[in-house]
Image: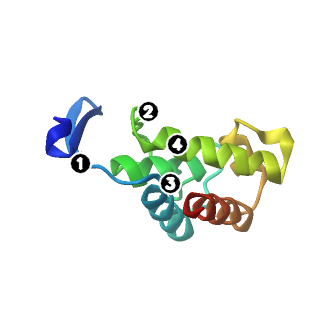
């Protein structure tokens, strides 16, 4: 499978095939999703369709805010995000959801911007 440049994952009991994306591409896409649909608190996606930080990353990777794909660039994205959150406010390290729930949309966008910049280095 790797020779084809694709990978599979099981999401919502369905096997999906996607071309590999870089961590930077994933973060850029997640930031764009959050910029358009961000604002959910306490949930990956609320009834109005708004998503939280984690929901945006999930959506960017899997196509749905509530789907997870831990064998992918999501791992790297979350590690970078958590490092940025630690620098922003050390009380929230490892808890992107708690950071999202207690900070503004602009704060979360700033975390995405710093994470994207870090992947450029």
Q: Earlier in the sequence, mark 4 or mark 1?
A: 1
Q: Is residue 70 left or right of residue 102?
A: left
Mark 2: which secondary structure? loop
> Residues under labels 4 and 1: Cα distance?
17 Å
Numbered mark located on residue 18 in the image:
1
Sort mark 2 into few (<14), some (14-19) or many (20+) by Cα contacts within 10 Å: few
Indicate which disc residue 70 carries.
2
- 81 over 34 or under it: above or below: above
Q: Is residue 121 left or right of residue 29?
A: right
Is 109 on the left-hand or right-hand side of 72? right
Nearer to us: label 4 or label 1? 4
Q: Residue at x 44, y 56 (%)?
A: 26
Sequence-wise, which precedes: disc 2 or disc 3?
Answer: 3
As helix, strand or loop, the secondary structure at mark 3 comes to helix
Tell us which disc is closer to us: 3 or 4: 4
| Image quarter of the C terminus | bottom right
Q: Quadrant of residue 43?
A: top right
- 75 or 52: nearer the eye? 75
Spatial CA span between label 2 and label 4: 10 Å
Mark 3–mark 4 Cα distance, whole angstroms, equals 15 Å
The x, y position of residue 29, in whole percent, is 44, 63
Q: Of the numbered discs in the image, which one, if any, rests on residue 56?
A: 3
Q: Which mark is residue 76?
A: 4
């Amino acid at each position: 499978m790797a020779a084809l440049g694709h990978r599979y994952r099981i999401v919502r009991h369905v096997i999906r095939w996607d071309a590999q994306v870089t961590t930077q591409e994933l973060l850029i896409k997640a930031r764009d999703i959050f910029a358009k649909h961000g604002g959910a608190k306490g949930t990956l996606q609320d009834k109005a369709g708004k998503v939280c930080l984690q929901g945006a990353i999930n959506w960017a990777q899997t196509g749905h805010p509530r789907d997870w794909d831990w064998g992918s660039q999501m791992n790297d994205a979350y590690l970078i995000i958590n490092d940025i959150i630690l620098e922003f406010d050390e009380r929230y390290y490892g808890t992107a959801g708690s950071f999202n729930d207690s900070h503004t949309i602009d704060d979360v966008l700033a975390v995405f911007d710093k994470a994207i910049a870090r992947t450029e280095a």
